[in-house]
Image (cartoon, helix red, strand yellow):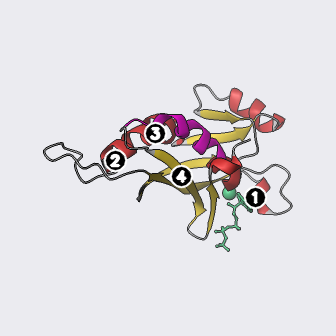
């Protein structure tokens, strides 16, 4: 069985070597969809009976480890020297420094690697993270699965 929980956040980014307008500083209303696989819990009387995992628990983990960190932050590739230097000059700025250019593909892959160990086996029903879908715009998204981890 598969379940999916969606969370949304706002963040700034740029793709420094992009040939068009994405090299400019801009932001998105991102959406993160977390798809988990696992068995449906069959334990009458338990609060999670009939669930793969309580959606509120799925949300709490993603919120604590990804969404709250990236929300209203600027996501910057550590090799983007001019923007790194500028953001460092802004007192108390919320900046997330990444080892890769902040494309939808890389953000999906990074979110997968952060969240993967946090969902695995926590419910004893072979729970596992199957896919992270990261929407950069309503029309553009990337899917990361285990095969995409570096
Ligand atoms: N494969 C990828 N291509 C692009 C990415 C990306 O992350 N992966 N990112 C961008 C830009 O950051 C931008 O967010 C997308 O721009 P655009 O294609 O213009 O998307 P819009 O929704 O604004 O376009 P509409 O045509 O207005 O729907 C570029 N490419
Ligand atoms: Zn963009």
Contact, mark 2 vs mark 1 (Cβ under 8 Å): no
**Image coordinates for residue 1, horizontal then vertical, percent:** 40, 59
| Residue 85 found in image quarter | top right
Ligand 1: quadrant of the figure: bottom right
The one of 140 and 76 positioned closer to us in this rendering = 140
Report if residue 138 is visible in the image. Answer: yes
> Main SS of the magenta segment?
helix
How many numbered discs sit on the rendered protein? 4
Identify the element where label 1 is drawn: helix
The boundaries of the magenta stretch are: 109-122
Where does label 4 land, which residue?
130
Q: Earlier in the sequence, mark 2 or mark 3?
A: 2
Q: Which mark is residue 119?
A: 3
Mark 1 to mark 4: distance in Å?
Answer: 29 Å
- Seen in the picture, residue 70 relative to 38 is either above or below; the reply is above
Q: Which mark is residue 53?
A: 2
How many C-alpha atoms fall within 10 Å of the one at disc 4: few (<14), some, or many (≥20)?
Answer: some
Q: Residue at x 71, y 40 (%)?
A: 76
Q: Quadrant of the C terminus?
A: top right
């Amino acid at each position: 069985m598969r379940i999916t929980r969606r969370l949304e956040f706002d963040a700034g980014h740029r793709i420094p070597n992009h040939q068009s307008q994405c090299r400019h500083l801009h932001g998105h209303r991102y959406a993160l969809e977390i798809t988990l696989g696992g068995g449906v819990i069959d334990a009458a009387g338990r609060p999670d009976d009939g669930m793969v995992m309580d959606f509120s628990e799925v949300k709490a983990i993603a919120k604590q480890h990804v969404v709250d960190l990236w929300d209203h932050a600027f996501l910057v590739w550590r090799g983007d020297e001019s923007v790194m230097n500028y953001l460092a000059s802004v007192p108390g700025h919320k900046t997330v420094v990444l080892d890769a250019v902040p494309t939808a593909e890389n953000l999906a892959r990074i979110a997968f690697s952060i969240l993967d160990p946090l969902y695995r086996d926590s419910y004893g029903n072979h729970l596992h993270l199957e896919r992270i879908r990261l929407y950069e715009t309503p029309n553009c998204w990337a899917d990361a699965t285990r095969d995409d981890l570096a």
